[in-house]
Amino acid sequence: MIADWISYRDAAAALLVAQLNLECPRDVLRPEHRGRRDLVGTGWSYRTHGIGVDVTRTNGHGGIDFDFSALDGQLFAPPDFWRLVLFAKRSVHDRTIDSHRYKPIIDDAERYRNLIDAELDHQFPT
């Protein structure tokens, strides 16, 4: 699931850079880009929040929420448990990922929390 999330995050960041003519995806957090805005002609919109951004389809299906890292030399913060669950729900709803893999997590996220937390610890050791 984390590999899917990272791939989708990278595509969303590239979309922001291309559509807003940013030098770096983090530049979406500058005051002139803050708020909720449509990326005209793409079918996507974004909403900034704190140190992150939520990129969603304008039709309400799909999307990803991610934060930028506060650590030097690291662009993105790792996903947390609830961002991964939200991603799974949105992606299954949008039919962009295999629903059979993620349906159990969507149906009972807490039951799968240990599995997801272990995967997060493996991918992003502290």
Image (spheres, rainbow, N blue to C red):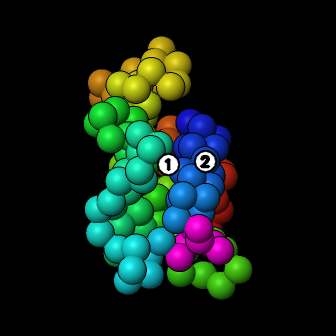
Q: Is residue 13 left or right of residue 109?
A: right
Residue highlighted by disc 2: 11
| Three-letter amino acid code at the position of disc 1 | Asp
Numbered label attached to residue 117: 1
Q: Which residues are magenta?
A: 21-27
Q: Residue at x 35, y 67 (%)?
A: 48
Coordinates of residue 60 in the picture (x, y in percent): 29, 36
- Who is closer to the viewer here, 12 or 126? 12
Q: Nearer the viewer, mark 2 or mark 1?
A: 2
Q: Is residue 1 left or right of residue 62?
A: right
Q: Is residue 43 left or right of residue 36?
A: right
Coordinates of residue 17 in the picture (x, y in percent): 59, 63
- Who is closer to the viewer here, 38 or 120? 38
> How packed is label 1: few (under 14 Cα within 10 Å), some, or many (20 or more)?
few
Q: Is residue 41 above or below residue 23?
A: above
Coordinates of residue 30 in the picture (x, y in percent): 44, 81
What quarter of the picture does the N terminus occupy?
top right
Query: Of marks 2 and 1, which one's residue comes earlier in the chain?
Result: 2
Specify the farthest residue to the right: 73
- Who is closer to the viewer here, 31 or 90? 31
- Who is closer to the viewer here, 84 or 120? 84
Coordinates of residue 84 in the picture (x, y in percent): 44, 44
Q: Residue at x 59, y 71 (%)?
A: 22
